[in-house]
Structures are given as C-alpha cells and as structure tokens.
Image (spheres, rainbow, N blue to C red):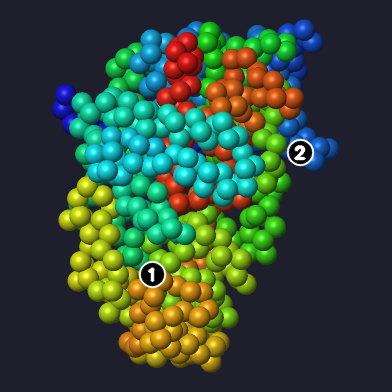
C-alpha cells in the first residue's frame, strides 16, 4: 500500500492549530432549540435521555453542580431517522480512533460521531510497557517497580486494577496497532529516557513515525532548544492512517455530528446516542453492543474546572493558566445525566508541564531572583514548583558554553544521529534572540531590569551558584555535580510565564473494563468511557516520569474496549 497522504481523506487533523493541542470532542456546545418550547418532553415511563449542552448548564442555576442537572429529554417525534450498529463511539480523538479500530478489526459494525470537521490529534508520545521497540533495544521495564512508582506518585488514590491493566496490556496494544498501520508506512520508535534514580524517565515512550509530519531537523526535537513549539505532532499521521483504515473497513464516520444525549432504558442499559448533524436534524444512533464516550476533558467548562481542579483554580495565579484542551465536558455530563458518577477522588490534577518541556535549565530563578529547585528536576515536578512560586513565573540564565556542556539527546533512542550539535543549539538560541523570545546581555543588571528581578538578589544567586560549581557541591538544592556549570557573561536569558495545563486529568467513575459506574460502583450496562473522559487513573500530578502516559492509556483502553465489546475479553 502506498504511504498515507492526509490529503486522501479530509484535509488534516484539527491538531495543526493552537499548538496542536485541541480537545478530543464529540459532544455538544449549545443544544438546538427545536426540542424546547412547546415540544412534548416525553412521558415518565419513556427511556431516560439527557441533552449535553452549555445551554443546559445555565438552566441549572439553583444547583451548586450544574453539570449534574439534566435538561428536558428530546421528544421521540423530533428524531428524523434511526441508524443501528454494534458500537457507537462519541468522539474521534486518540481514544475514540483506537476504540473504533479495535472494534471494527474484531468484527463489529462501528459508528463514530465527531462534532468537528475532522479528527482531533495532540502530541504523539505513548507510554507503554515492553513493546517491541523497547525490547529490541534491551530497554525492558520492570512493571512491579514502575507501577508502584506510578501508584506512589498518586498516593494510591486511583484504581490500581486499571493501572495494572495498562501495565500488563499496553505493550500488546502498541504492537497490535503497529501491525495495523505498517501498510501505511508508519512504525513506532522509542524515545529518550533517563535512568537517574530520583528523576528517572522510564524507557517506555514510543512515537509513530514515517508520515508527512516526521521531523527533518534534529534541533527542532532537542529538549534543550528552548523553543516551546511542539516541533511536530506525529499523532496526526497515526490517527490519519487509522481513520483511513477504519473507513476502508466500513466504519460509518459522521463528522459534524454532535451528540446531544444518551438513551437509557429505565435503570437498564444505555442503548443509543441522539445526535444532531450540521443542519440541526436529530438522528438516533442505536448501539447493540455498547456506547463508548471518548469526548475528552472538561477544561473549557469554567464551573467544572473550578470545582474539580483546585490545584489550578485555588492558586493565586490560576486564572492565568492557559487551558489547551478544548473539551467542554459534554460527554461526561451526558453520562452523569443517565446515572453515571464522577470518580471518587474529587481533586483532579492538571497535566501541567508546558514551559518546563524545552526550557534551558542551567540556572533558574523565581521572581525574587533566587533559585527554587534542583534544575535537573523532571518536567512535571519542575512545572509544579514553578506554579508554587510567587507570580508563577521563572527566568532561565545560561551562556554560550552551555551548548557544549549539555548532554547530546536524540529524540529517537534507536538513532543517536538525531541529537543536535552545539553549533545547532547556538544557532537556534540566536534565532530566538532575534525573535525577542530570548535575550542576550553582558551583565546581570540588564537581565534584572528586563525581567523585573531584584538585581542584588540575582547577582548574589549567581555568585553563590558559581561558588558551588567551583566546590563541586550544590549546598542549596544538591544538583548533580556533573551538571554544575559556571555562569559567566555574556548571558542568554528568557522568562517562562505561568505554566499551562494541557488537560484536567479526572473524569467519570469507571472500572478497569472502562464501564461507567454509578455512585454505588454499579456498572451501567452498555456505557463505556475512555481517554480523558474516564477518571480513576490520576491523582496529585500528571507525571512525566512516564512521558506520554495519557496517550498510552488511550491506546491501551481503546484496544481493550473494542475487544470487550466483541466478546474477546
């Protein structure tokens, strides 16, 4: 088969915009008005239905949890047509695409509803356990050590069975998807890892390359290039290949179709999704096997964000946190309105590491001009520490010699030629100076003035740091002596604003089989949630020690839910 071209179906993924980090969405914003005034709302003994709309949340002003209050059901008389299939998947982001692929490959008929004009892609790194690319490089992970580390990070306030399902089945899932996309010219490769005990990055992160978005320059992928752009979004190529594949297998993919409500038969199974097309006409999509909610996070619902993500909303600079994920919680709300519940742990961590991803980490100071962390800290820990500083900002300082002092890191573990050279790093930094993102200065006073830092405090910080470099011991934060590099002028510097949140990592109460549960832990027959719509997997923080674990989880449970619906699990 010829290599995939994104032009062969719809023109690209939504991820191409807004830094490639749009939400995974398949549900409603404002609900259509045709089922409102003067319409029959249905009798008490009719199936339970609920509309997913921002309009409906404004109706619930008397509730302190407006997202839980269901609007009036859509009348059966307003439904223009009915479509039947084995599985209905709401949302064509990563998790929805993976579930659709698994279901159709296992013999099920599949309908996918996506409210946008094409699929939604973000990032591309998938953390999985012991897939073929890892084993071929002798980079096997001990699941017992890694899973216990993951659970310790979350203080065990998660569903350990689900975490173990990810650990036990993710390598199998990744290898299976690799076989599916191989005819489209894609294949997985292992990314960089680090075996430092405290700040370990486990060697389980894979990306799929070989498509139109494969990088052509090592410098654009270097973790020390200082550029907070994404570089490339390989998930676009992967989801594009899978979309082409499932459509060739007969999947009924409905773009510009917005789920408005789920249909539940009394207190029994969820049997259908009612959605509107681009013209506002209602169609009931009956699911003989199950409905899979894959609609992403609630990051754009201000009330839900304030309630469920206090780490952000209760911080003095929480209102400055950019929310990159465009999910409005609509799929989550629809599930709540038919009897589902939110995860028991009500403190959902943000996926917060943006800003610390490609930052320069020689000397980092806060708004008081003093260091606040061992600069070798992992990305998620670094972002958490930054967010805890007054003003939530930090300033990096380094010099030209740092380009030669940095470790050469290839974004591909199987090909070290993808490591940037010192010359490439310097050229990149100079280019960012020209763009006004970095600055160059002969003195620390210039940097203090540019970034509103106390000059005396900044100069003392650098003097103390250089003393630690000379002594070979960091007496403040005990940074690895091998990474202590004297800081003398001329200097580079840049300021990192309040870190962004890529998504809120909490959602519906689900079990390890992705079944949506009631508040009494009872599965709702026929209703599943995966990806960012599903909860019970994260607490305290999203840890980059398992870089790409969100997409790895999407891939694993998308694969498993398709098999479950086919009766193979």
Q: On the image, which quarter does residue 124 sit in?
A: top left
Mark 1 to mark 2 CA distance (whole Å): 42 Å
Residue furthest toward the right?
62
Residue depicted at x 34% and y 60%? 223
* Residue placed under numbered mark 2 in the picture: 65
Question: What x and y, as percent, mark residue 449?
Answer: 49, 86
Residue ID at (45%, 35%): 167
How far from the left and from the top, in percent, is residue 190?
Answer: 29, 44
The answer to whether residue 502 is above or below residue 121 is below
Residue 496 visible to an observer of this rendering: yes
Whichever of labels 1 and 2 marks the residue nearer the N terminus, that label is 2
Estimate the x, y position of residue 176 in percent, counting from the top left: 32, 25
State which mark lies toward you, 1 or 2. Answer: 1
- The residue under label 1 is 360
Q: On screen, 129 above or below 562?
A: below
Assign a secondary structure to mark 2. Answer: loop
Task: Please name whichever residue, 282 or 376, is drawn nearer the observer in this view of the structure.
Answer: 376
Q: Residues within 10 Å of mark 2 (few under 14, many from 20)?
A: few
Q: Is residue 224 above or below residue 527?
A: below
Vertical order, 467 against 558 (above or below): below
The answer, for residue 97, to whether it is visible in the render is no
Q: Residues within 10 Å of mark 1 (few under 14, many from 20)?
A: many
What residue appears at the point 64 percent right and 42 percent down from the top-left corner? 157
The quarter holding residue 487 reads bottom left
In terms of depth relative to the viewer, which is nearer, 321 or 197?
A: 197
Please state, as top left, top right, bottom left or bottom right, where the N terminus lies in the image: top left
Q: Quadrant of residue 134?
A: top left
Residue 500, image x, y percentages: 52, 57
Q: Is residue 419 left or right of residue 553?
A: left
Left or right: where 455 falls relative to 189: right
SS category of the residue bearing label 1: loop
Q: Could you tell me which residue is drawn at 47 percent across and 10 percent down?
A: 567
């Amino acid at each position: 088969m010829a290599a995939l071209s994104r032009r062969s179906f719809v023109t690209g993924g939504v991820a191409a915009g807004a830094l490639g980090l749009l939400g995974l969405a398949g549900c409603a914003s404002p609900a259509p008005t045709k089922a409102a005034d003067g319409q029959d709302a249905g009798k008490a003994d009719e199936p339970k239905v609920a509309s997913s709309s921002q309009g409906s949340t404004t109706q619930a002003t008397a509730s302190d949890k407006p997202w839980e209050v269901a609007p009036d059901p859509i009348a059966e008389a307003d439904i223009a047509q009915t479509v039947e299939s084995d599985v209905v998947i709401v949302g064509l982001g990563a998790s929805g695409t993976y579930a659709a692929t698994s279901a159709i490959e296992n013999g099920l008929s599949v309908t996918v509803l996506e409210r946008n004009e094409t699929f939604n892609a973000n990032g591309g790194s998938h953390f999985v356990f012991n897939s073929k690319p890892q084993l071929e490089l002798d980079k096997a992970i001990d699941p017992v050590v890694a899973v216990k580390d993951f659970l310790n990070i979350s203080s065990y306030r998660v569903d350990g069975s689900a975490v173990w399902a990810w650990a036990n089945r993710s390598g199998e899932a990744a290898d299976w998807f690799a076989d599916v996309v191989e005819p489209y010219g894609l294949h997985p490769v292992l990314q960089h890892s680090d075996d430092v005990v405290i700040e370990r990055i486990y060697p389980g992160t894979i990306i799929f390359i070989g498509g139109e978005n494969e990088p052509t320059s090592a410098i654009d992928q270097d973790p020390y290039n200082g550029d907070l752009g994404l570089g490339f979004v390989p998930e676009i190529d992967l989801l594009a290949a899978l979309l082409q594949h499932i459509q060739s297998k007969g999947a009924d993919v409905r773009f510009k179709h917005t789920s408005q409500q789920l249909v539940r038969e009394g207190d029994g199974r969820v049997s259908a999704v009612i959605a509107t097309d681009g013209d506002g006409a209602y169609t009931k999509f009956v699911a003989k096997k199950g409905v899979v909610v894959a609609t992403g996070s609630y990051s754009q619902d201000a009330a839900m964000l304030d309630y469920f993500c206090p780490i952000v909303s209760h911080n003095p600079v929480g209102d400055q946190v950019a929310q990159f994920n465009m999910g409005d919680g609509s799929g989550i709300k629809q599930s709540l309105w038919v009897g589902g519940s939110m995860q028991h742990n009500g403190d959902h961590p943000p996926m917060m590491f943006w800003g610390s991803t490609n930052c320069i980490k020689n000397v980092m100071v806060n708004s008081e001009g003093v260091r606040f962390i061992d600069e070798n800290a992992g990305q998620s820990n670094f972002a958490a520490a930054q967010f805890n500083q007054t003003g939530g900002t930090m300033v990096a300082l380094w010099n030209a010699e740092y380009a030669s002092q940095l470790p050469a890191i290839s974004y591909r573990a199987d090909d070290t030629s993808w490591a940037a050279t010192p010359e490439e790093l310097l050229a990149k930094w100079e280019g960012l100076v020209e763009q006004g993102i970095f600055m160059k200065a002969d003195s620390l006073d210039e940097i203090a003035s540019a970034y509103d830092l106390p000059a005396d405090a900044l100069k003392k910080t650098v003097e103390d740091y250089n003393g630690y470099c000379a002594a070979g011991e960091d007496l403040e934060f005990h940074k690895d002596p091998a990474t202590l590099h004297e800081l003398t002028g001329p200097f580079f510097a840049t300021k990192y604003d309040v870190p962004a949140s890529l998504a809120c990592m909490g959602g519906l109460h689900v079990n390890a089989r992705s079944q949506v549960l009631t508040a009494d832990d009872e599965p709702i027959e026929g209703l599943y949630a995966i990806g960012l719509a599903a909860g019970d997997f994260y607490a305290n923080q999203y840890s980059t020690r398992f870089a790409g674990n969100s997409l790895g989880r999407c891939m694993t449970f998308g694969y498993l839910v398709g098999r479950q619906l086919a009766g193979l699990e």
